[in-house]
Each structure stands twice: as C-alpha cells, then as structure tokens.
Image (cartoon, rainbow, N blue to C red):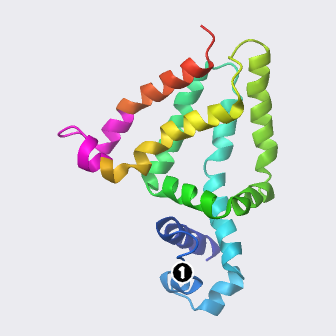
C-alpha cells in the first residue's frame, strides 16, 4: 500500500506541484480515506519527501556511478547520462518542470531530502573523482557548477519547452523522440568541448 501511495502521490505532485496538491486528493485517488493515508504519511511534507526521495533514488545514484568510471572517455559517460535521463523524462515528461518549480518553491526541502538519503556523500565522491581527473590533466579545469548548468540545461530544455516543440519545432513526420535522438550528439559535443583536453 505504501508503494501504491507513493506512486499515485508522485503523479499528482508532478502534475500539480506541492502547493496545489492536497492529502484528500491523494487519498481519493488511492481509494482510501484521509485517516488511512495519515497512517502511512502523517503530513504532506513527509509524503513529499518520500515521493521526491523515490524520484531521486531512481536516477541520481546511476548518474554518480557513470561519472566515476574514469576508464571511459567523458563523451561516452555523458552519452550514458543522457540515456538515463531521457528514459526517466520520457516516462515522466513533466518531471523537469516539477523539479524547477519545487527548487524555486523550497530548495531546502529538496536538499534536506537528499541529505536524509545520504546523497551528498555520493555527490562529493563523484565530484572528487571529476576533480581528480582535472588535476591529473585528463579534463579541463572547469568549475563544477558550470558543468552542472551546461548538462542540465541542455538535457531539460526540450522537456521544459515540449508544447512549443510540438507546435513549432518538430519537422514534418518527426516525433519528439526522434528530435531527442538528433539533439543528443549536440549535447555530447558541447560537453566534450567544455571538458575534453584536445
């Protein structure tokens, strides 16, 4: 039942955001009453933490594991990261907008949730691995925040502007997934230009 609640709550939170989601709505969609829902999650914050934790754990550990594979060229690692995010975003196309909205609403709640999941330890491990490669001269010296900004903006913008893309930016007979596959080498190329030592 708890897994069912999290899955249904995830869909509602992603669709409506934290502020517009009510415990009553989630209880109704699950098919239980509100006291029954409170048995599993006493507050909306606790439920949101569980939902956001579920989302984070479905992707971030995979990304960190890809980043620390020093035997692979950075372009290949970026390609694997893109594939990981594309899979998640295609299954949940409104997820990037949800994350942006919730960062702006209450970034501390997201950070606290990540800390409860011990993700900062893995993050700093992946960060240390990238910094080591920079010190060893295998990658250019680039501030980590610029790597983050570049990769996540390139990954997210097609999903954040999906309605515009469908209306104006797709070629005739081209699907959204076709466009993503065409966009992927450009992301890889830009990240290689940012990080690779020629």
Above or below, 192 relative to 79: above
In which image quadrant can residue 170 be found?
Answer: top left
| Foreground pick, 65 / 157 | 157
Magenta segment: 165-181
The structure residue drawn at horizontal position 46% and vertical position 56%, both measured from the top left corner, is: 92
| Foreground pick, 165 / 119 | 165
Q: Is residue 99 magenta?
A: no
Quarter of the image that includes the C terminus: top right
The structure residue drawn at horizontal position 45% and vertical position 43%, both measured from the top left corner, is: 157
Picture coordinates of residue 145, whole percent (x, y):
68, 36
Residue corresponding to mark 1: 26
Picture coordinates of residue 159, whole percent (x, y):
42, 48
In which image quadrant can residue 26 be found?
Answer: bottom right
Picture coordinates of residue 121, whole percent (x, y):
82, 44
Picture coordinates of residue 25, whole percent (x, y):
51, 83
The structure residue drawn at horizontal position 66% and vertical position 78%, both measured from the top left corner, is: 44
Query: In the shown orientation, is residue 80 left or right of residue 138?
Result: left
User: Label 1 neighbourhood size at 10 Å, few (<14), some (14-19), many (20+)?
Assistant: many
Q: How many marks?
A: 1
Q: Hey, which residue is sitting farthest top in the picture?
A: 198
Which is the main secondary structure of the residues drawn in magenta? helix
Query: In the shown orientation, is residue 101 left or right of residue 53?
Result: left
In which image quadrant can residue 19 be found?
Answer: bottom right
Query: Callout 1: helix, strand or loop?
Result: helix
Q: Hey, which residue is sitting farthest front in the picture?
A: 104
The structure residue drawn at horizontal position 64% and vertical position 41%, both measured from the top left corner, is: 62
Above or below, 33 relative to 95: below
Above or below, 93 relative to 2: above
Quarter of the image that includes the N terminus: bottom right
């Amino acid at each position: 039942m708890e897994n069912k609640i999290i899955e249904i709550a995830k869909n509602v939170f992603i669709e409506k955001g934290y502020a517009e989601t009510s415990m009553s709505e989630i209880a109704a969609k699950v098919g239980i009453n509100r006291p029954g829902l409170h048995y599993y999650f006493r507050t909306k914050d606790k439920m949101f933490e569980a939902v956001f934790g579920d989302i984070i754990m479905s992707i971030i550990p995979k990304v960190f594991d890809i980043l620390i594979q020093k035997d692979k060229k950075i372009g290949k690692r970026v390609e694997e990261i893109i594939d990981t995010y594309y899979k998640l975003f295609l299954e949940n196309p409104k997820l990037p907008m949800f994350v942006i909205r919730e960062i702006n609403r209450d970034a501390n709640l997201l950070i606290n949730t990540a800390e409860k999941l011990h993700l900062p330890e893995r993050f700093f491990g992946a960060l240390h691995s990238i910094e080591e490669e920079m010190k060893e001269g295998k990658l250019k010296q680039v501030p980590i925040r610029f790597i983050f900004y570049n990769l996540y903006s390139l990954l997210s913008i097609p999903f954040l502007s999906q309605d515009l893309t469908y209306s104006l930016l797709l070629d005739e007979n081209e699907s959204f997934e076709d466009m993503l596959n065409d966009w992927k080498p450009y992301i890889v190329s830009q990240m290689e230009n940012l990080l690779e030592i020629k």
